[in-house]
Image: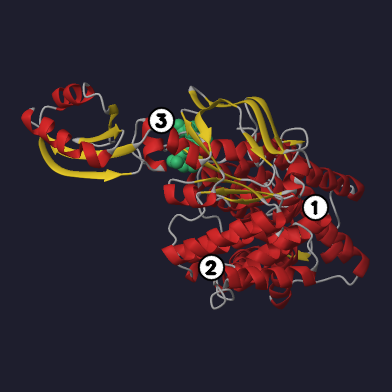
Amino acid sequence: MPDLAIDTQQLVKQYGDTIAVAGLDLKVAQTTIYALLGPNGAGKTTTINMLITLIPPTSGRALVGGYDVVTQAAHVRQCIGVTFQDIVLDPGLKGREILDIHGRLYRMGAAQRRQQIDLLVQLVQLEEAIDRPVKTYSGGMKRRLELARGLLTGPQVLFLDEPTQGLDPQNRASIWQYIRQLNQEQGLTVLLTTHDMEEAETLAQTVGILDHGQMVVEGTPATLVAALGADVIRLRGNGHDEGIQLSLQQLAFVERIEPGGEAGLWHLFVDDSSRRLADIITIATTNGFHIEAISVAQPSLGDVFLHHTGRALRDP
Amino acid sequence: MVYATYVIWSKHMTKFFRSAEQVIGLAVQSVLWVLLFGVGMSGFIGTVEGFDYMSFMLPGIIALGALGGAVGGGLILLEERLHGVTRGYLVAPIPRLSILLATAWSTVTKSLFQALLMLIVGLLMGAHLVVQPLGWLVAVVLMICFALGFSGMALAMAAQSRSIMGYHGMIFLFNLPLLFASNALYPLAALPGWMQTVVLFNPTTYFIDTVRMLVFGIPPTLPMALSVGVLLLFALAGIGLAFLSFRQSLRA
Ligand SMILES: Nc1ncnc2c1ncn2[C@@H]1O[C@H](COP(=O)(O)OP(=O)(O)OP(=O)(O)O)[C@@H](O)[C@H]1O
Ligand SMILES: [Mg+2]
């Protein structure tokens, strides 16, 4: 295996006039967990679809596990595991049958199949449901079955498109733990997309934020957050928005002021929030801005996301 | 490829046998067609060229069953495509052709069951079998070719359709005319001249003509070698067409 588990060069995917992926250079080192973030329609799923050989790139090149996704697609398929963003399960089959068929398509031996299936079913806590038809599953159970399927064949590179959406916190946490364990013990490389900042922060060693099909920023969660500056004050209220923005901007201790993704919400990046809070309240009030709520926090990955995409986590 | 085809085929069969609706539907349909077409028509036609109409008609009814089966097979592919199940196969290390072959084979398997059932009902209703096991074997092979060919055509359409409604529209265009523009209902010689030409472009004609001879001993109107050749070619063409259409649909 080469150093980079995933390596794309100027990868482009165009649908008619829509450019879904616009010249992406994505590098994911061996044995890392990489989280791809981005607003709806940023091109995350399209990128994954090209990497898993489902759709051909319009131009550019992509290597997975050192193999070209176009010219060596068969090799790529052999070394990847995938869970799709939407649920794709045969409703008429039982959970165990779905896993078994999947294992057979990858030519796993019967004994190995049985052993792996038992292990994974236990992990995703589907012991009771596994011999029932999938159409009797809840949404979260289907998701868990899909995860088990993605992991069944022992892939070297695992692609997870919003893997834990719709899962309850307990299941989410146990899946995170297992993914991390596979990553540490077996050197599994994971590329996941998510809208869940907590997921990205807890799981990923590297985070990339995609917008309009291009990489906006990339780094470890800690460096991305650190780059934002010291503290963030979230100010919510109503009044003369531009006026307040201008007058706060002039304060020496305010590094930056950004819209918070919804009307009346502002994020102020300041050197030391606890000392500056009183000043900010005074200035806002004297400028005719009525404060409804104010809070102080360390910047989070969510703030990084907002800062670079200028949008709330989901499109308004 | 053979193994992947087998795995997906067995999945289709599991799903089929698990769905009582489908199994019973297929059985009832088979019985009804034999009764309606065969018994109904043989009531007022009686004999064709000295053979009972039931024997004459049965190969045509079986062909009709296979046509219906092919439509159903296309529907399976279409549903798997629309629901995304196909995507799972596409990222697995298996040849793409095996996805199609598996669907075509499961269609053929069901058609063979149906044909057997129709044959039994037909015999009970007075059709006369000739005892020549080798001929039966050839008839089964031809049946497979015939069903494969039409499955291929249905799959080719299903690979391109964007919706179930659209698919049915396309299918309707070719399903019924195929039965009527053939020798299923009348002997070839009884058709007007221009119609005979049209009918000779229809693989159904060759299938029916040969099966009549092999299973019911009704003298063929076409050389058997020609019929066998046409049907083999038809099977290959059908699968080839399905493959091209499917591959093209993946280039989006
Ligand atoms: N088959 C397609 N035909 C036309 N346009 C498409 C197709 N698939 C995706 N797109 C477009 O490409 C862009 C990127 O879509 P993509 O699904 O990759 O976004 P995403 O980042 O996965 O979004 P989400 O967070 O909502 O899942 C969107 O503008 C979308 O409309
Ligand atoms: Mg997506």
Query: Residue A188, percent across and down?
Result: 68, 52
Query: Residue A86, percent across and down?
Result: 50, 51
Q: Could you tell me how far apart the alpha carbons at marks 2 and 1 are, in whole angstroms?
A: 35 Å
Query: Residue A258, percent across and down?
Result: 29, 30
Q: Could you tell me how far apart the alpha carbons at marks 1 and 3 are, in whole angstroms?
A: 60 Å
Q: Name the subunit of mark 1.
A: B
Q: Which mark is residue B47?
A: none
Question: Where does label 1 land, which residue?
Answer: B145
Nearer the observer: mark 2 or 1; the answer is 2
Question: Where does label 3 land, which residue?
Answer: A308
Q: Is residue B26 above or below residue A17?
A: below
Q: Amino acid at mark 2?
A: Val
Query: Residue A96, percent across and down?
Result: 63, 71
Name the quadrant containing residue A2. top right
Question: Where does label 2 land, which residue?
Answer: A134
Q: Amino acid at mark 3?
A: His
Secondary element at image label 2: helix
**Label 2: how many residues lie within 10 Å, few (<14), some (14-19) or many (20+)?**
many
Image point (48%, 48%), residue name: A201
- Label 3 vs 2, first from the N-terminus: 2
Q: Could you tell me how far apart the alpha carbons at marks 3 and 2 are, in whole angstroms?
A: 40 Å
Image point (61%, 28%), residue name: A25
Q: Name the subunit of mark 2.
A: A
Q: Name the subunit of mark 3.
A: A
Q: Is residue A101 above or below residue A131?
A: above
Nearer the observer: mark 1 or 3; the answer is 3
**In this orientation, does residue B62 appear?**
no
Figure label count: 3
